[in-house]
Image: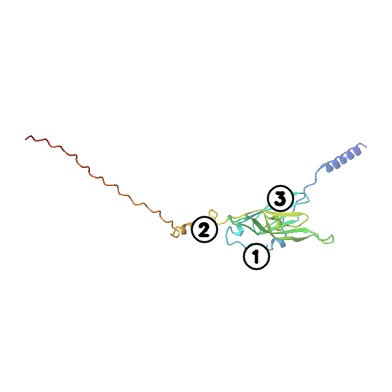
Amino acid sequence: MTRLRIATALSLLSVLAACGSEPAPEVQDTSVPDAIAGMQAAPAQAAQGQQIGTPNKDRVVTLGVLNKRNNLTQNLVMKPGESRRIGNLVVKVATCEKTLPWERPQEEGAFVQVFVEQRRTTAEKLAWHKVFSGWLFRNNPGANVVEHPVYDVWVKSCAMSFPGEEESPAEAASSSRAAKASGNGGTPAAAPTAEPVPAPTPTPEEPEPVEEPAVEE
């Protein structure tokens, strides 16, 4: 009887311990499917606008990703050609661009493709579907948006540089026009020098008259 009680108590303790322990966190798969990883992300778009500035392979794109189910926001720092997976979401970047430093208004953008693993119908198996492919703009996000009930993706920055950012073409053209207006091409005309004025020649002073002594006759 005593052994039965001890066995029952031990079984209850094991059940209580199992109920109180937290389940192990689920390991999230971050591997990009081969079909998406091997896909070229809009090669025509990636080739546009790369004649000046940082080469496409060296540019850095920062994207924001929002999961509307849990209100969790993450930043993705990527280079053109890279793919990144978050759960059942894959983001692929082809290129990014920004306006020249002297252009107004300023803008930054990136060509992004978004894939989501989902079922289009309840009878369909989970499969990867492309839900967005196009340009996203930082200062004008309404021009093109990722329309999806769960995920939102937007551009935060495009890190690249241009040669000659110290002086804008407008400033260079202004200085060139000023030089041409002076009549000497690109070399400024020398300022006219004033001719020296000769100093006045001093006039000789007349000698004072000398009185002669009177002579007596």
- What is the distance, in whole Å, between disc 2 and disc 1 at their CAs? 34 Å
Q: Residue at x 72, y 62 (%)?
A: 35
Dot 1 alpha-carbon crowd within 10 angstroms: few under 14, some 14 to 19, many 20 or more: few
Q: Mark 2 points at which residue?
A: 173
Query: Which residue is at the front of the view, 110 or 25?
Result: 110
Residue 123 appears in which quarter of the rendering? bottom right
Q: Which of marks 3 and 1 is nearer the N terminus?
A: 1
Which amino acid is tagged 1?
A: Ala
Tell me the quadrant of the picture where the C terminus can be found.
top left
Residue 122 appears in which quarter of the rendering? bottom right
Dot 2 alpha-carbon crowd within 10 angstroms: few under 14, some 14 to 19, many 20 or more: few
Residue 81 on image: x %, y %:
65, 59
Identify the disc placed on residue 44: 1
202 sits left or right of 95 in the view: left
Residue 36 on image: x %, y %:
71, 61
| Residue found farthest to the bottom | 44
Circle 3 sits in a helix, a strand or a loop, which is it?
A: strand
Residue 124 appears in which quarter of the rendering? bottom right
Q: Mark 3 points at which residue?
A: 74
Between tags 3 and 1, which lies in front?
A: 1
Q: Which of marks 2 and 3 is nearer the N terminus?
A: 3
Which amino acid is tagged 3?
A: Gln
78 sits left or right of 27 in the view: left
Tell me the quadrant of the picture where the N terminus can be found.
top right
Q: Earlier in the sequence, mark 2 or mark 1?
A: 1
115 sits left or right of 106 in the view: right
- What is the distance, in whole Å, between disc 3 and disc 1 at their CAs? 29 Å
